[in-house]
Amino acid sequence: MRRFHRSWREQKARRDERWIVLLWLIEALVLRRRALFLWRPTMAVSFDAAAAGGVSPSVTNLTINITIGSSANRAILVMVATDSAAGTTTVTNGTDTFSAISGADVTQGTIHLLAFGAITSLTGAQTITITPQNTGHPLQAGVLTFSGVDQTTPFNNGNATSNTGASPISLAVTSVNGDLTSSAIAQDGPGAGSVTTNQTSRYTNSAAAGLGGDTGPGTGNTTHT
């Protein structure tokens, strides 16, 4: 695991690059109906579980174990950071179908950060597998699971930004009460181990401390910094 962190840093030893991907989980189906039928919401998106991991460039894929709860209307969010030369990345877990989340994709230098999402009927112990098209590159990821998620349109308003300085990086997203927002940040170079957030931290990858993920409330225009 230490080899992965060194390899990640060695590629850009003199740069301090940060990437952040922000997106929000749309409200539960009954909450969407409020806008259509003026019903009061009876369910909101809730955080369930989190896990993260990383592998050295010599490994062909990354597996992350996570236990999914049994609350209704579940979804999985996977944030992946790798080298842009790794090519197309795929995410699998049993019968779940993962898709890249539109807008939640950014490349800075040679590092690529992107998000995948899926609704799921699975519960209990699960193994998320992240596989790059081309091996030989560092790979790290964070996994979040949620309940109370709209099963037709679970993810919306994907957004991303990047910078190459040491200053904080922020991104805002439009949402409504009952939504949940989430972001991930990956950074490399001097100070890469100090990933912090103004929202609720959910994971920091101990194998490559430059990756972190959080969740925040749906309050209209939530900012993650």
Image (cartoon, rainbow, N blue to C red):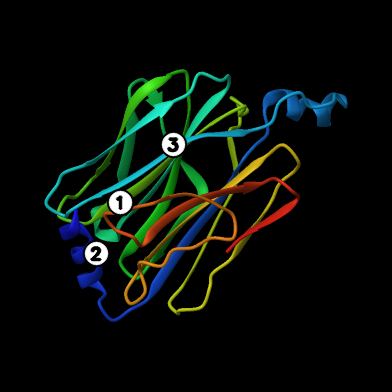
- Residue 75 image offset from top left, x and y in percent: 51, 30
Q: Residues within 10 Å of mark 3 (few under 14, many from 20)?
A: some
x 39%, y 27%: residue: 67
Disc 2: which residue = 8
| Amino acid type, mark 2 | Trp
Quadrant assignment, res 212: bottom left
Q: Is residue 69 left or right of residue 81?
A: right
Q: Is residue 38 left or right of residue 160?
A: right
Label placed on residue 140: 1
- In contact (CB < 8 Å): disc 2 and disc 1: yes
Disc 3: which residue = 99
Quarter of the image where the C terminus is located? bottom right
Query: Disc 3 and disc 1: Cα gap in Å?
Result: 18 Å
Query: Disc 3 and disc 2: Cα gap in Å?
Result: 26 Å
Q: Residues within 10 Å of mark 1 (few under 14, many from 20)?
A: many
Viewer-side label of 3, 2: 2
Q: Residues within 10 Å of mark 2 (few under 14, many from 20)?
A: many
Residue closest to the far right: 38
Q: Is residue 55 left or right of residue 43?
A: left
Label placed on residue 177: none
x 69%, y 31%: residue: 44
Mark 1 or mark 2, which is nearer the start of the sequence? 2
**Secondary structure of the residue carrying numbered label 2:** helix
Question: Is residue 4 depicted above or below 54 in this figure?
Answer: below
Residue closest to the far left: 58
Mark 2 or mark 3, which is nearer the start of the sequence? 2
- Residue 14 image offset from top left, x and y in percent: 28, 81
| Amino acid type, mark 1 | Gln
x 35%, y 48%: residue: 141
Query: Disc 2 and disc 1: Cα gap in Å?
Result: 10 Å
Mark 1 or mark 3, which is nearer the start of the sequence? 3
